[in-house]
Amino acid sequence: MNIDRLKQIVLEAGEIVKEGYVSHKEVSHKGVVDLVTEFDVKTETFIIDQLKEAFPGYALVGEESHQGSYHYEKAIYIDPIDGTTNFVHGIPHLAISLGVWEEGEPVLAVVYNPILEELFWAVKGEGAYCNGKKLEVSTQSRLQNALIATGFPYAKVNAGVEYRWVIDCMTNLLPHIQDIRRLGAAAVDLCYLAQGKVEAFYEIDLKPWDVAAGILIVQEAGGEVSNVNGERYNFDDKSIVASNSKVHTQLLEKLEKI
Ligand code: IPD
Ligand code: CA
Ligand code: CA
């Protein structure tokens, strides 16, 4: 496996996203508030064509084309644009995310924000980096001083259990932390945690392509990832909780089980 080839692929794919960011876009709805543009599809098609050649033998699990299982012996999880709502609204918090997993473990990760030209990457056992600088999670150990990123699932529009969970967690958490950020791209939120900008991140209903790369980047920067029960996270879990490890237990105590 070659991290340099993976970086090269996202840098090239970034040109498509950059072009789309400043162009008029045809926007379609996958759900009531879940958007997709022609650039999500074009970027994913480009990435898949490149990966097929560069990484034969890997299942290619892309948000816009994949159907079926999330579990493979060797797979690459692809989010061509994480943060499509930001992309459509001209807000530069978005990224291309590629996470390579083997036998249930992340081994390589790249997350590239082509608008801000930030390239995050990690290799298992070799650390995590942004534009060549080594990443380390923050050393903050008091939940009250923690800035926490989260996201709201598209299912919120049904005002059902997911919506209730979001509100209940916020009710429990908000008085006991510094503040909440809802930035709009889970893959980048995880990179910001790895970079020490936020102390933790949690969300429900995420898909493997949202987190497959960010998990390794957090772990390699010294952070911790679990589900809301504090168990090892797996792609079938409804929840993910990631932190600098120092506030992990305190955060889990405030989050509702789901
Ligand atoms: C979404 C973003 C967002 C998160 C959503 C994701 P998309 O991905 O990561 O921050 O809250 O749950 O689905 O749809 O922009 O690729
Ligand atoms: Ca996504
Ligand atoms: Ca996406």
Image: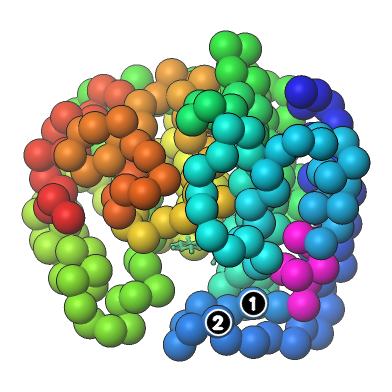
Q: Say which mark, if any, is on residue 106.
A: none
Q: Say which mark, if any, is on residue 36.
A: 1
Check if residue 40 falls in the magenta segment.
yes
Query: Percent x, y for residue 45?
Result: 81, 62
Check if residue 133 falls in the magenta segment.
no
Q: Amino acid at mark 1?
A: Val
Can you say which quadrant of the picture contains the C terminus?
A: bottom left
Left or right? Give the position of 78 relative to 195.
right
Q: Is residue 122 above or below residue 47?
A: above
Q: Toward the viewer: 72 or 230?
A: 72
Give the residue pinned by disc 2: 30
Question: Which of marks 1 and 2 precedes in the sequence?
Answer: 2
Q: Toward the viewer: 203 or 50?
A: 50
Q: Is residue 99 above or below residue 63?
A: above
Residue at (80% x, 24% y) in the render: 2
Query: Percent x, y for residue 208?
Result: 50, 49
Q: Is residue 15 above or below residue 101?
A: below
Contact, mark 2 vs mark 1 (Cβ under 8 Å)? yes
Circle 2 sits in a helix, a strand or a loop, which is it? loop
- Is the residue marked 1 within 8 Å of ligand 3, measured from its CB? yes
